[in-house]
Amino acid sequence: MGTNLKFYEDNKLTELCTYGFTSANESVSQFLYDRDPTTKIISVGSDDDTDEVFQVTFPSPVLIDTIFVLGHNIKLGTLRYGTSDDIDFSPILNWSGNATPNTMFSFTPTTVSKLFLRLQDAMIEDAQKFVSNFVATKLIGEVQKNPSKLDFGYKDAKIVGQTYTGGSYTALFGRKASIKASFTDASDTDVSLFRTIHDLGDPVFVQMNGGVNSYTQDGFRTQDIFLMNWVNDFEPKLKSDMIGIGALIDVEMKEV
Amino acid sequence: MTLTLAQTLKKNTHKVIRRCYIKRRLIDGTYESNWQRIDFYRSRDQVIDWGAFSLEIDHNPGDIGTFEISSLQMQFVNTEGYWNVESDSHSIWAPSTTYLNRKLTKLKIESGYLDSSGTEIGVATVFEGVIDKVAMSEEQVASVTVLPYSSVLTHYLITDLALTGSKTVSQVVNAIMNQSKITTFIPYVAASPTNNKTVTDSASLSGNYWTILKQMAQLSNSIPMLVGTVWSFAPRTQTSEIKWSFLGAGTQFPDIFKITKFDDEGAERVRTVFQCDDDSGGKITVTSEDPILVRKYLNDPQQIDLQSIDLSDRLPVLQSYLSYWEKSRPILEFTSKFMVNILSTLDKIRIKSFGRVLPIGGVPRWGDGSAWVDTSIWGRLTGSINILNQSYMVTRVQKDLQNWVFAITAEKIV
């Protein structure tokens, strides 16, 4: 797998799954998959001697090859599947001495019915253990060649008003990402991938860093995976009026 | 340090929380036990338009003793068919063997704020009601009309209760409100009317519950109010506590966005003559004893239906109305920040908003004064609207959830 722009299926964690937490509040289990970095599932009365296990049971087996655990404080922990936290992925997915709050795991495609996220030690000793977002997904595809132009940004949903003194008043409702990528040398394989995504009828996760999680620039960090709809027309065009030398295509996507 | 909602509202930069939930009716007619969140459903934001609703007393001028909550019109994404009829397997109401239909599904909206550390502040239910209908559009949008719980009170007739004999206003009101078919929606709170008059023949009452409640309010000079799910049947008087001090033009940190209307007299609502029928085909009339007021506001007698109470009680009720409504009260309409549930009808507020302020001594010079409120220099008020720390009572609040603004109507307390 390369390091170019990638697309993933929607999160397999939904309202249709069953959630079981050792001590955390199960009534807010949607915090695990709400894509909101301000909400989190957090243990209650736990410490480094007491494991906190987040168990996810899917309504039917799902095929996955990538897991993102975002906004967490796991120093030591494991991620397994099976019926009772008994089977390791390949390669083994775990944290040991971890100090970064966002993790991406890639592994051999595996069909799972249950996932077990075992949080053993927190980054700060005996602190309550938490996870903000958990995405279990499968790679749809990776472009063979990155876009020649990439316009990425965020758009606020907000009210901007004015007080009597001319001072500004703002009320922010949310922020969503959007990208406009211009491919000037898209291979037939890439155009086929774009057609698949365009025709999917579902949003997809877009990962601009291509799995290189060392970037620190906003939009390219580990946590910057955006669930997006394809919003422009699917219009692959001939390059220089010739066939066989790649295609021109614009991909415009907006976060859902 | 976590700020209170009031402290948060003083700021001019806000992060907003809006959530919407439903409770479906099960096939046996009862409601499911837990609220289902639907503004964010199946990992997607679902609301296109949150709509707006209003709470209002004295809905029509002269129509005393009324309270109205408007309906709420929301729009949801329906590309997945979640809002379709229950027989569609994609519907939130499927399977139809488990849930009843969309109508009468409970819907509530919570709102509040987030502080800079992500802590929720002042989150509360601002609206709760029942779905009346869902309309579909070609754009894959579901337009949902939600009625307040007061609409439930229009579905039942007072004759259901088979009341007989004489009953006080509070007995009639409590008999209506303390039934399981009502408390399912509106938790029971005993009535405390202004004048707890006696209905001489309760068997003669006719109409639906809501009509009767408004009639009882009129008999007792009270107001039936429903804010969220909090019911009250109480005097039409302002709260003793000042709920908010609004600052407008000419102040340093204004929170009034705009004064949209100012009726500095309030003449339209003044009534100097009240009248009701006696039991022998005649009229009982009370007229203001202030000849200037009668000359100023000469108008038709305000007719009040007091037939259901004893003849001897009617004159005091009319006098009670007259003493309030013969006075003119300026009416102010303005917009401000979204105050969640801090403000409601009958709340007492203070207003400070200057119109045109000029220097007392003539032409100002640099250094004469530093602020508009420096009355030693800038004390000469002219212009249309000069409200200097006056008390008003809120008579209408429109909560615009989509545009995140309150539109407030208030009458001056005199």
Image (spheres, helix red, strand yellow):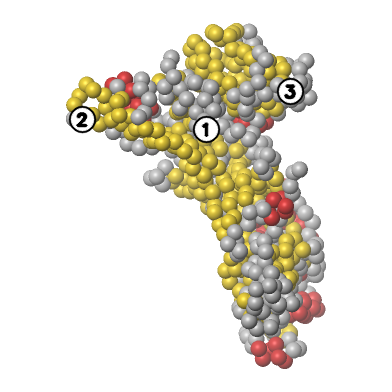
Distance from Cα at disc 1 to Cα at disc 2:
35 Å
The image shows residue B109 at horizontal and vertical percentages of 62, 47
Q: Does residue B113 sit above or below B59 in this rendering?
A: above
Residue identifier under label 1: A218
Total marks placed: 3
Of marks 2 and 3, which one's residue comes earlier in the chain? Answer: 3
Chain bearing tag 2 is A
Residue identifier under label 3: A124
Kind of residue at badge 2: Ser
Which residue appears at 65% of the width and 46% of the height? B113
CB of mark 3 within 8 Å of CB of mark 1?
Answer: no
Kind of residue at badge 3: Ile
Which residue appears at 50% of the width and 31% of the height? A219
The image shows residue B302 at horizontal and vertical percentages of 66, 80
Q: Considering the numbered disc 3 on the image, is that residue within a helix, a strand or a loop? A: loop
Residue A109 visible from this viewpoint: yes
Kind of residue at badge 1: Asp
Label 1 neighbourhood size at 10 Å, few (<14), some (14-19), many (20+)?
few
Q: Does residue B117 sit above or below A60 in this rendering?
A: below
Residue identifier under label 2: A240
Q: Are marks 2 and 3 on the same chain?
A: yes
User: What residue occupies the far left of the structure in this picture?
Assistant: A241
Label 2 neighbourhood size at 10 Å, few (<14), some (14-19), many (20+)?
few
Left or right of B313, for residue B357: left
